Image (cartoon, rainbow, N blue to C red):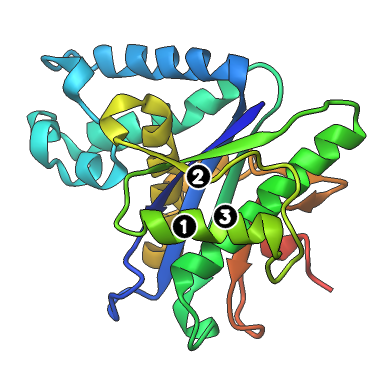
Amino acid sequence: MYVLYIDDSGSAGNPNEKHFFLGGIALFERQIYHLDQTLETLVADTGLPEPQKLELHGNEILAGRKKWRQVRDRKARRAIISDALAKVSTIRGKSRLFGIIIEKAAIPGRDPVEYAFSQLCSRFDQFLTRQRHDGQDQRGLIILDKSTRETRLQTLSTEFRTEGHDWGRTRWIADVPFFVDSRATRIIQYADLVAYALWRKFECGDTEFFDIIRDRFDASGGVVHGLHHERYANSACDCPYCQTRRT
C-alpha cells in the first residue's frame, strides 16, 4: 500500500494570489514511520521547548509566528525548512513527491481546488499503475489535512472511481480520502512544506526550497509525471514539468 499525504498552499478565492497549489508525498507503508521519526528528530534538535507541539508549517516557520517566534534569526528559520525538505533523500526505496500548480487565470470558470485534486488523483493513480506493471500489486490511499472542502473532495474521489474524470478513471485508489489533524502526523506537515516550496517559487520567485526537491517528483522515462503546472501556453517556465514537455 502506498499512502499519499496532501496539503495545499495559497487561497483559491484570493484575487491577490495568482496560483493555487497542492503538494504531497507518496510513501510505501513501511516508509511512513522512518520519515516521521526523522522529522521528529529534526524538530527536537532545534532545542525549542516541547518539540512535540511544534508543527512544521512553512509559512509559520518562515514568518516566525506562533512557537517559531522563539527562533529569531530568519536564516535559521529558513534552514529548518530546507533541512526538513531534504529529509526525503534519507528514505530508502520508492518515495515520490507530487505537486500541482494552478495559475487560476488559466482555467477561467473552473474551481482551482477541484481541478488540482483531479490532476493529483490521476497522477497518483498513474504512479500506482506503473508499480503494478513492474510487478508490485499495490493500491493507494490519500490522506489530507482537515479542510472545509472535506465532503466535496470525498465525493469527487468516489466519482473518479465510478464515473471517471477529465483524464480517465482512477483504478487503484482504494477508498475516499481520509482527513486528519496536521498535529497528529509529521507526514502531513511534510506535505505542507512541499506545497509551501511550490508557493514560494511560483508565487514569490523564491526558488531555494523548491530546488531541494525539484528532482524528487514522480518521473518515468525522462518525463516528470508527479508535477503539473497549469499555465498560459505562451508563458515561460523552467520547472521540471514544463521542461520535459517542451517541443
Q: Answer yes or no: do the residues labelled 2 and 1 have beta carbons within 8 Å?
A: yes
- Disc 2 element: loop
Q: Quadrant of the N terminus?
A: top right
Front-most of residues 182 and 93 = 182
Query: According to the image, label 1 marks what residue?
Result: 153
Dot 1 surroundings within 10 Å: few (below 14), some, or many (20 or more)? many
Q: Residue at x 43, y 49 (%)?
A: 195
- Disc 1 element: helix
- Disc 3 element: helix
Q: Tell me the amino acid under the disc marked 3.
A: Ser
Dot 3 surroundings within 10 Å: few (below 14), some, or many (20 or more)? many
Dot 2 surroundings within 10 Å: few (below 14), some, or many (20 or more)? many
Which comes sooner in the sequence, label 3 or label 2? 3
Instruction: Let me know if residue 201 appears in the view.
Output: no
Q: Answer yes or no: do the residues labelled 1 and 3 have beta carbons within 8 Å?
A: yes
- Judge whether 94 appears above or below 146 on screen: above
Q: Residue at x 20, y 43 (%)?
A: 60
